[in-house]
Image (spheres, rainbow, N blue to C red):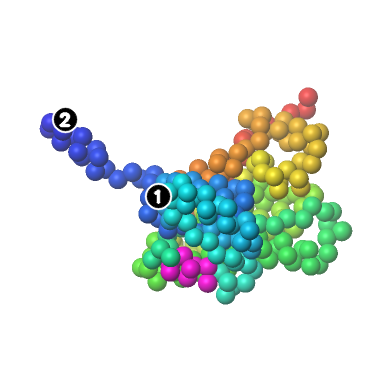
């Protein structure tokens, strides 16, 4: 076999880590982790639809992706509304012809002791984090099945969904529910070739998280010292595992939870 033939065959090999051409919805796609996920997928050839409750958050991200040469559309969606989730999926299909990946990145939290959380506050967090993941996933699964099967759902939980959260019980409980929902949907929809996985980020450097979770240097430094890597995570360090789970390289991975938390190493000095 000549060198030219070897080079040709290598060029023809399909990259299993590619997301090129995979039509992707990113909820909560206008800020923080969601915006990073959208940018990274679009930069690698995935047509992306970003969704959020606020158009003002979505427009700058959409325009940035387009300026960089990517394909991106946006839709204003309240994931608590099942019909709105159906419309979101329909918008992706109308724009790009199909759907391959759903990334449930949307989220809400209230930092409050349990005794001070109002009934409406509790319901809002649970309905967005858990209810929204359910409704968006159900809409995506219906589209995947209508296309003949296949497709990938990636849910964003949190380390708080594994360990609990003394300061944000509604958030931790709802994110724990997302983990269980991931496992349940992976079992239910696996017969259609649909893979459902979950990423549970630890402390990630975003403006919103910083204001709520580590509002001063003492708390921030305590969080950093609790991580084996001795630092906060970056938004792209959540986006990259999403790329892997959406790719064919993860074709036999479903119903799993991947923690992206820098490693646990409590320090007492």
Return the x and y of residue 259 as percentages of the image width and height. 59, 44
Residue 249 appears anywhere in the view: no
Magenta residues (range): 87-94
On the rendered structure, is 206 left or right of 62? right
Task: Look at the numbered disc 2 and give the secondary structure of its residue.
Answer: helix
Left/right of residue 75 with respect to residue 16 in the rendered view = right
Binning the other alpha carbons within 10 Å of mark 1 as few (below 14), some (14 to 19) or many (20 upward) gives some
Residue at image point 12% right, 31% down: 2
Against 193, residue 212 (above or below) is above
Q: Residue at x 67, y 51 (%)?
A: 161
Q: Is residue 166 visible?
A: yes
Residue under pointer 2: 3
Q: Earlier in the sequence, mark 1 or mark 2?
A: 2
Q: Residue at x 24, y 38 (%)?
A: 10
Position of residue 220 measured from the top left corner of the image (x, y, whole percent): 75, 36
Is label 1 in a helix, a strand or a loop? Answer: loop
Front residue of 201/47: it is 47
Residue contact at pointers 1 and 2, CB within 8 angstroms: no
Residue 42 coordinates in the image, percent (x, y)? 45, 50
């Amino acid at each position: 076999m000549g060198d030219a033939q070897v080079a040709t065959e290598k060029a023809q090999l399909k990259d299993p880590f590619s997301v090129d051409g995979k039509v992707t919805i990113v909820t909560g796609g206008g800020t923080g982790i969601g915006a990073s996920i959208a940018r990274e997928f679009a930069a690698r050839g995935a047509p992306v639809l970003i969704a959020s409750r606020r158009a003002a958050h979505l427009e700058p991200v959409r325009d940035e992706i387009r300026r960089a040469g990517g394909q991106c559309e946006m839709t204003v969606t309240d994931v608590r509304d099942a019909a709105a989730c159906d419309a979101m999926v329909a918008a992706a299909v109308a724009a790009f012809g199909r759907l391959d990946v759903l990334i449930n990145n949307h989220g809400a939290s209230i930092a409050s002791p349990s005794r001070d959380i109002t009934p409406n506050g509790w319901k809002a967090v649970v309905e967005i984090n858990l209810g929204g993941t359910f409704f968006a996933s159900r809409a995506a699964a219906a589209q995947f099945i209508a296309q003949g099967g296949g497709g990938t759902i990636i849910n964003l939980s949190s380390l708080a969904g594994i360990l609990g959260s003394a300061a944000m019980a509604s958030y931790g409980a709802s994110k724990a529910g997302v983990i269980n929902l991931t496992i349940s949907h992976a079992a239910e929809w696996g017969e259609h070739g649909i893979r459902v996985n979950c990423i549970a980020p630890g402390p990630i450097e975003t403006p919103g998280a910083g204001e709520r979770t580590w509002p001063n240097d003492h708390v921030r430094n305590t969080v950093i010292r609790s991580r084996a890597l001795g630092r906060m995570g970056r938004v792209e360090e959540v986006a990259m595992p999403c790329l892997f789970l959406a790719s064919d390289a993860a074709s036999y991975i479903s119903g799993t939870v991947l923690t992206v938390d820098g490693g646990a190493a409590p320090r007492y000095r």
